[in-house]
Image (spheres, rainbow, N blue to C red):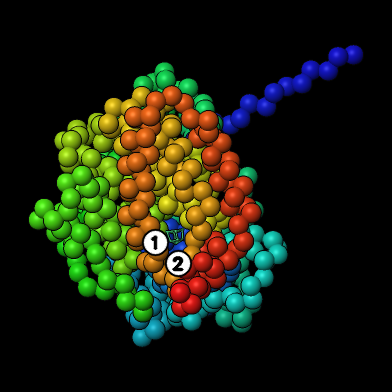
Amino acid sequence: MSTVSLAVVPEPISLRILDMFRIGPGPSSSHTVGPMRAAGRFRHHCLDRGIVPHRLQVELRGSLSATGHGHGTDRAVLAGLCGWEPETVDPDAFLAIADRLRAEPEIDWGGRRVRLHPDDVAFDRSRRTDPEWLPHPNTQVCRAFAGDGSLILEESWLSVGGGFVQRTGDEGGKRRPPSPPIAPFHDGRTLLEQARTFGSFGTVVLANERVWEEEPGLLETGLDRIWDAFRACIRRGLGRQGSLPGDLGVVRRAATLATQVDSGRVEESYRNIARAQAYAYAVNEENAAGGIVVTAPTNGAAGIFPAVVVEAAERLGLERVAIHRALATGAAIAMVIKTHASLSGAEVGCQGEVGSATAMAAAALCEILGGDVDQVERAAEIGLEHNLGLTCDPIKGLVQAPCIERNAMGVAKAWSAAQLALNTGGRGIVSLDKVIRVMKRTGDDMRREYKETSEGGLAVNLPEC
Ligand code: SF4
């Protein structure tokens, strides 16, 4: 009797462009935006069940505990329990929330008053790593208690990078698109094949989105909102001087670099890159200060993509359609990396954040400069390949050093990757899919000290240097 083996058809990627670009407060998508969103979901679940707790508690574990103070995770959780959304939160109220709740420890709870004090957010210091306790490096446990101290509801939430969150037990419940994608792809190779048919990487994901959008024009409006948020963040960052919050004494440098460029003191051959680097400084300094930024694909690495694309758009006078396509191309690269590896520094180190952002920016720039789809794939691959092994080691848990400068360097790498792809010809021996697999393997092999715990690299060795 012969047996027939059926090939498993991989599920197409159904992530959305706006999943990759989320507006929210800094300094971290996984340690600020994600925990805020998770706390907000827990609040909703309580309200949906009619639970009015006597007391709330959130326990931060793993990397959320190790670097949560520097990343403002406690502040983000308090804001989420208040029902504030990352996209619409008032940045000043957000920064002041802990002080306000310390003075008056009460919040509105669907028309009732519920006690909430900053001390209700607890940082677990046990360093336990067993999967029961720590199913993900970024785990938070939310609890609601009755007046007699009994537990009414407990939920464990995982912040899995880029502001995405997942409740434990819901892992199988992936959001499904309303219909199959018109241009299905499940990895870099199939994305490239579709791009050959549709003309560009961006056009592939835009075609899928058009089929899925609830109302015509919604996607364009969303992309315009992201573009406006990119430029507003760059403007704000360029307009500010002084030191960033925290006791590192990091000085804002965006305005200084921009002035150097504008006054002609920067060598001509470096001018365009330097301007884009000033934009990256601007975004990451805003992020470090708790300002509103866009994940691209994370907050820590939020500067590279907008810096490269905004500078190119200004210099080349890009039309709205080309800008949307560039956003979509960057998002397509991030979707593949997220699906097959990770965008989270706590999971794979900084290669997943700055490496992914460099790949996104390199691909978008290559496309803007007229690269064909093979060159765009190569630009993304080069951008990621030369960030392999990059560890996450923020000093004092603040998303400042090395993060801000690392974004500026990511801009230069993205430029070089796009130019190498455009000008060296032929296919490389490493495909985008291969480099993503290596990034995942490298991240798995990386010791936890180098994955957003501030226990390795610059975070601990600086005083000895
Ligand atoms: S070192 Fe990289 S991954 Fe870590 S917080 Fe900074 S930007 Fe994010």
Which SS class for mark 2? loop
- Residue that sits furthest to the left in the current view: 263
Camera-nearest residue between 180 and 187: 187
Residue ID for mark 2:
394
Quarter that holds the N terminus: top right
CB-based contact (under 8 Å), mark 2 and mark 1: yes
Q: Residues within 10 Å of mark 2 (few under 14, many from 20)?
A: many
Vertical position of residue 170 compared to residue 38: above or below: above
Instruction: Indicate the position of residue 67 as horizontal and vertical percent values.
Output: 49, 70
Please tell me how crowded label 1 is: few (under 14), some (14-19), or many (20+) other residues with Cα within 10 Å: many
Going 60% across and 63% down the picture, which residue do you hit?
A: 448
**Drawn side of residue 375 relative to residue 43, left or right:** left
Is label 1's Cβ within 8 Å of ligand 1? yes
Q: For this view, does 440 lie left or right of residue 335?
A: right
Residue 426 versus residue 31 in the image, above or below: above
Identify the amino acid type marked 1.
Answer: Cys
* Residue 38 % position (x, y): 49, 60
- Please name the residue shown 59% across and 50% down the image: 442
- x%, y% of residue 303? 32, 53
C-alpha distance separating marks 2 and 1: 7 Å
| Location of ligand 1 given as a quarter of the image | bottom left
* Residue that mark 1 sits on: 403
Q: Residue furthest top?
A: 1
In the image, the residue with mark 2 has its CB under 8 Å from the nearest atom of ligand 1: yes
Residue type at the position of mark 2:
Pro
